[in-house]
Image (cartoon, helix red, strand yellow):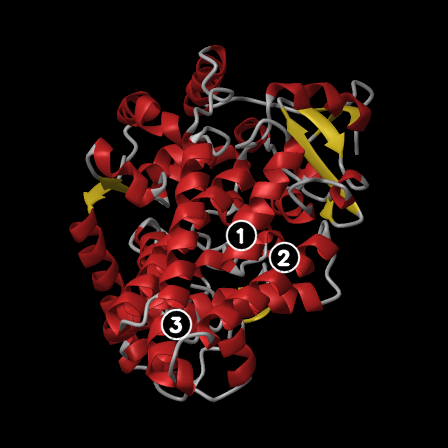
Amino acid sequence: MADSKGYISKTELETHKKPDDLWISIQGKIYDVTQWSHHHPGGPLPLLNLAGQDATDAFIAYHPGIAWQYLDKFFTGYYLEGYLVSDISKDYRKLAVEFSKMGLFDKKGHGTCILLTIIALLFFICVYGVLCCDKTWVHLCCGGLMGFLWIQSGWIGHDSGHYTVMSNKNLNRLAQLLTGNCLAGISMGWWKWTHNAHHIACNSLDFDPDLQHMPFFTVSSKFFNSITSAFYGRKLNFDSLTRLLVSYQHWTFYPVMCFARINLFAQSIILLLSKRKVPNKGQEIFGILVFWTWYPLLVSLLPNWYERVMFVVVSFAVTGIQHVQFCLNHFSSSVYVGPPNGNDWFEKQTDGTLNILCSSWMDWFYGGLQFQVEHHLFPRLPRCHLRTISPFVKELCKKHNLAYNCASFWKANAMTIETLKSAALQARVLTNAVPKNLVWEAVNTHG
């Protein structure tokens, strides 16, 4: 137990990692955030994943300087015994301070307003093409533009979930609803729930939902043991159907990605219809209803069923490019089993991510994902500054002999397929897989 000096050991701190008893350490001070977890803007899951340990680097990554003043109300009066800071963490924190002094976290530029204007223009062109033109090729092009529009709206949704892209929080929330729920049919509440977990537990097979794609894909043979997902709270059964699908996953990867958006639609609806607490749930549901009003209506206005089906297929297939991009950044990177460790935050973020090499004029295509290492280390940083900080991050990795992983777009695709192929060949030699919960696994696939 705590001694008279107000110190507690790491061992005792580790006992406080339950929903009803949640303590964390930040810069050696112990905080009881049990009650706060129910009101935490990022949800309770990030706190639970880092409970019972030091979470300083994660706190720095996700919170602005103003957040420090609110910590005192949660202070237990105890300090962590033997608290030490690694050289890597020291340098990481110094870098975060330098970027803050440079004002990079506050300088967002005008990219969002420009992109919103482009999205509005593309939407108008699509609607005009469907309503006012009778050429089949025009309708198919409009389907492609719709897919491209969804990709660009996805970048705004992603950015607005990490930092305020507009002049205030209310406008930021409006931008989220318009570009995510209303325009793309994706619940921003669902996205923030899964994406926060992904960032905290980057490439943990059992804690990162972005690697849990069964029954269609597995990136590691460790999934063959039917591991339990800490995110979903259930076992990911590696049954005979999963084995069959995984055995050919390097061939089915791109076709599945063409229709991966269906899964995002389903996951959004499932979450909003569940009993799980979702912030602004009414707004979320309203936005989804708006999408499922205008999109089917627009498709129904096409002259025949062939063009309607092809419009949907083309729009989904074009958006599939973005789903491929999501996978390239992590599928071929290092993975691990178990909860995230706050003491090796920097190392886990760099090991589990892959940058995509590209010229600056192609930044619009990647939406910031080309600097995945930098984004994971500094998620609050506007993407217009990711290229600026890249040399600093690369130098820090070099100083501490850490990998700074990067590859061209084509090489990253080859690496991803090779990872899938390796797991596929291992899956083919397995025996005695028993079917179980196939429908539920299919419905709860992410990608």
Q: Quadrant of residue 114?
A: top left
Amino acid at the residue labelled 3: Val
- Tell me the distance, in whole angstroms, between the alpha carbons under discs 1 and 2: 8 Å
Left or right for 367, reference 46: left
Q: Quadrant of the N terminus?
A: top right
Q: Quadrant of residue 373?
A: top left
Q: Which residue is mark 3?
A: 312
Circle 2 packing at 10 Å, graded few (<14), some (14-19), many (20+), is: many
- Tell me the distance, in whole angstroms, between the alpha carbons under discs 3 and 2: 20 Å
Q: Residue at x 66, y 56 (%)?
A: 284
Q: Are marks 1 and 2 in contact (CB under 8 Å)?
A: yes
Q: Residue at x 40, y 59 (%)?
A: 128
Q: Residue at x 48, y 14 (%)?
A: 103
Amino acid at the residue labelled 2: Gly
Q: Which residue is mark 1?
A: 180
Counting residues from the start of the chain, the first of labels 3 and 1 encountered is 1
Q: Residue at x 27, y 36 (%)?
A: 403
Left or right for 384, reference 135: right
Q: Which residue is mark 2?
A: 287
> Which element type, helix, strand or loop, lies under badge 3?
helix
- Tell me the distance, in whole angstroms, between the alpha carbons under discs 3 and 1: 18 Å
Amino acid at the residue labelled 1: Gly
Answer above or below: position of 187 versus 316.
above
